[in-house]
Amino acid sequence: MTAPTEIRQRAMTLLEQLPGESLIKAVEFLESLSHEFLQLSETSKTPNSETALLQIIQRRLSPEEQHRLSYLRQQNENEEITETEYQELLKYINRIEQQDAERAEALIQLAQLRQVDLKVLIDEFLPTDINLT
């Protein structure tokens, strides 16, 4: 078996072992990954690769999503968060971490494309007043 085939087989085996609620979460996670991959695939097909990279770098949560995330973080900090809210918070955190990884990769690629130091682009595109709390 080739490596991707082995990985798919391993994933299927693990999925078969999951109980119902965990299986639903796993499928939601896989759908999210698939959706993001399709978005990236479509973006990378655009004729101007710099434009595609800039779209990835500048992608952020909507104001509504940012407001909801702030609320969930505050609820968690106050220890007043419900289990449903906590699961929602974890989804936001996973999404943000994924977007941050994609943003970092896009910054590296753009730096190479423009032939500039990565720090120049980081200073240009990333906010200096990031509040992660």
Image (cartoon, grey):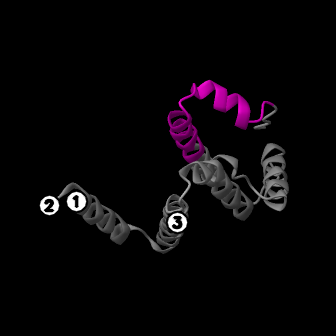
CA neighbours of label 1 inside 10 A, class few (<14), some (14 to 19), many (20+): few
Q: Residue 67, how many percent across, how many down?
A: 85, 55
Q: Position of residue 130 (x, y in %)?
A: 78, 35
Residue 118 is drawn in which quadrant?
top right
Which of the numbered marks, if any, corresponds to residue 6? Answer: 1
Mark number, residue 73: none
Residue at point 60%, 46% (across, down):
97
Q: CA distance from mark 3 to mark 1?
A: 27 Å
Q: Which residue is mark 2?
A: 1
Task: Name the amino acid, label 3.
Answer: Glu
Q: Front-most of 3 and 12? A: 3
User: Looking at the image, which is closer to me, 12 or 48?
Assistant: 48
110 in the magenta segment:
yes
Q: Residue at x 22, y 55 (%)?
A: 3
Q: In the structure shown, which secondary structural element does the residue marked by tag 1 occupy?
A: helix
Task: Give the class, few, some or many, for how many residues have Cα within 10 Å of label 2's Cα (few <14, many ≥20).
Answer: few
Q: Which amino acid is tagged 1?
A: Glu
Under circle 2, the secondary element is loop
Label 1–label 2 contact, CB within 8 A? yes
Image coordinates for residue 93, horizontal then vertical, percent:
65, 50
Of the numbered discs 1 and 2, the one sitting upstream in the chain is: 2
Q: Which residue is mark 3?
A: 42
Q: Nearer the viewer, mark 2 or mark 3?
A: 3
Disc 1 to disc 2, C-alpha distance: 6 Å
Magenta residues (range): 101-128
